[in-house]
Image: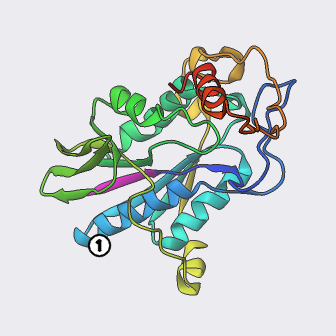
Amino acid sequence: MKIAVLVKEVPDTWGDRKIDPTTKRVVRTGEIVIDEINEKAVEVALLIKEAHPGSAVTVLTMGPASASDAIRKSLAMGADNGIHIIDDALAGSDAMQTSAAIAAALAPRGFDLVVAGNESTDGRSGAIPAMLAERLGFAQLTFMRTVQVTGDTVSGERLTDSGHLELSATLPCVVSVTEQIAEARFPNFKGIMAAKKKPVETLNASDLALPAADTGGANSWSVVDDVTARPARSGGTIIKDDGTAGTQLAEFLANAKLI
């Protein structure tokens, strides 16, 4: 089985996230790390590989040179090889363009299963897995908290507000996983050293033969018009019980459209 995993570098989850008011893009200076949900996706792929001898796991990222660190960590965890889509012409790509580039990289390589996180912690569109499945013509199982592969069938559970759904699909398939999925393993010293020798293929926009509409922020289908800084947190509303506390509370909740 050929398995691909999508990984991405993002600003540290615990850091202060900002959007540049000039470029309208996420500021990517400071601490940059592999997205935690991607590590969980890699873990899922490795567990499937271990359950199906002969399988191979390829990690794919799209980003600047620094994004290679996300690939190398995944290789140290146990992935077999990597693909790095890197081209300044792709900078600022929106979800539509990103899915087009990833699909162009995956399609000719004959993957059976593509695993991704349900959403990145910077963009949070949650749309890439579904877009990718549509472009590849694959089945899709999204927002999964468990995943198993038996023969040519992928199955698992998706949480809902009232319980969970048991879903299944036939390979080839795109699967996105949530935070409830397996905890990612830590790379050991042997894995870190082995990662240095594992192959990583680099691709640019020309290699992917992407049309102009699918390259770069200047051609984005979606555009950010304005950026406003989040206001400082206020002290909140204090209700003093002078005999009308119940009425004050009801009015506050009604104004906030909570009742």
Q: Which residue is mark 1?
A: 50
Q: Is residue 106 left or right of residue 190?
A: left
Residue beneath the point at 29% across and 72% down? 50
- Seen as rendered, the residue at the extreme bottom is 189
Tell me if residue 244 comes above or below residue 51 in the rendering: above
**In magenta stretch: residue 4:** yes
Q: Quadrant of residue 28?
A: top right
**Which SS does the magenta portion mostly show?**
strand
SS for dot 1: helix
> Is 90 in front, or is 153?
153
Residue beneath the point at 49% across and 27% down? 100
Q: Is residue 16 left or right of residue 209?
A: right
CA neighbours of label 1 inside 10 A, class few (<14), some (14 to 19), many (20+): few
> Is 247 in front, or is 214?
247
Residue beneath the point at 50% across and 72% down? 77
- The residue range painted magenta reads 1-5
Q: Is residue 209 left or right of residue 245?
A: left
- Seen as rendered, the residue at the extreme left is 151
| Viewer can see residue 53 | no
> Is 2 in front, or is 160?
160
